Amino acid sequence: MVKDTVETEKEAPASNGMRALVFNTLAMLASVGLFSYAIVLMANDAALVLGIAILVVTSLYFSVVGPILYCGLKILKPNEAMVLTFFGEYYGTLKGSGFFFVNPFVTATAPTKAAVAPSGTDKGAQSVSVSGISVPLSSVSSAQSKKISLKALTLNNDKQKVNDAAGNPIIIGIVVVWKVVNTAKAVFNVDNFAEYLSIQSDSALRNIVRLYPYDASDEENERSLRGSSQEIAESLKREIQEKVNVAGLEILEARITHLSYAPEIAQAMLQKQQASAVVAARQLIVEGAVGMVDMALSKLSEKDIVELDEERKAAMVSNLLVVLCGNRDAQPVVNSGSLY
């Protein structure tokens, strides 16, 4: 039965590369010396057969075996890996920094041709466009070495226009910090793990945003995109992780980097927010004014400064509320006559 997906990553058998390099180099030099010795033997009729045999063996080793063994030498830097196949079968993953010697007939496999940096790409560039998506060059295999980076990488897709739970169109952008943890899945289970992550991140973002409103008032006590950023980030991280498990990726962090209303409703929503702020401010002013009026009447009554009937108290309350709640500075009127 042929398996459609690879679930387990295994370590590729490898030995010390420097020891293999020295041995093969010395063997090739020895084959050159034996080649010369074989020519001398061939001049003697008694040793002609032996000379021909040595000549064939040394020529074969120098021209075929030696160069093939050099192909088994692999160099890896820290946080790099190489996925190897042996005649189409998954052979193993080479990890860890160092100089290694592996089966010379194995082939290093890149995730996909689309993930290989173009030959004309600027060496100083940090990303390359893959199917319209900006992908870091360090996250994909290079055309020469076909190594896979195991470092923590960032994905910053373009901003999206999505409808929130209230149906309002908003502009939102996220950044995802991720790394490859299973190189076998990343190479064999998806065509391009960087592009796959980008698409799944966009899909997860839409699924999460439609569950929450852009903003919610304190009275509603409801989670929102603007007020519950930590909870939204955790939900977004879990959603993306579930989608990219098949690709052998681990999501380290997912956070919102941009959040705003779409241009077509931004002005209306700004007016709504301003109106809400004005109402809240007026409510606070009225509560404070009522408290000050009550305190003023209590002090006047407590210290017997003046006795006011109910009509005068109502007039005083009205005047104080106008002064305290008005938008303009009060213009006092001096009463030089009697109280009544």
Image (tube, rainbow, N blue to C red):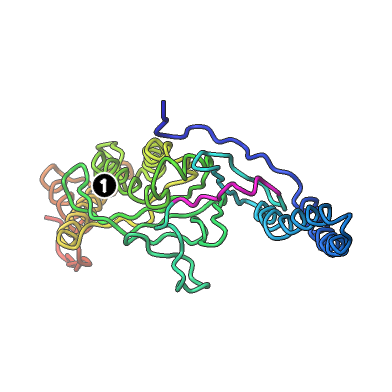
Q: Can residue 68 be seen?
A: yes
Is 53 on the left or on the right of 159, as rendered? right
Q: Position of residue 290 (x, y in %)?
A: 24, 46
Image vertical order of residue 258 relative to residue 251, above or below: below
Residues packed near mark 1 inside 10 Å, few (<14), some (14 to 19) or many (20 plus): some
What is the magenta segment's predominant secondary structure?
A: loop
Which residues are the magenta region?
A: 101-111
Q: Where is residue 284 in the image (x, y as percent from the top left)?
A: 27, 49
User: Quick check: 45 left or right of 87?
Assistant: right
Per the image, is 102 magenta? yes
Would you place residue 6 above or below residue 329 in this image? above
Q: Which residue is drawn at 14% across and 43% down?
A: 309
Camera-side residue: 51 or 98? 51
Instruction: Residue 323 in the image: state x and y as whole percent.
Output: 21, 59
- Residue 190 lies, in percent from the top left, at 40, 44
Residue at x-position 62% and y-position 45%: 94
Q: Is 230 on the left or on the right of 209, as rendered?
A: right
Q: Name the residue under label 1.
A: 215
Amino acid on which disc 1 is placed: Asp
Pick the residue in front: 84 or 184: 84
Magenta residue check for 127: no
Which of 299/318 is in front? Answer: 318
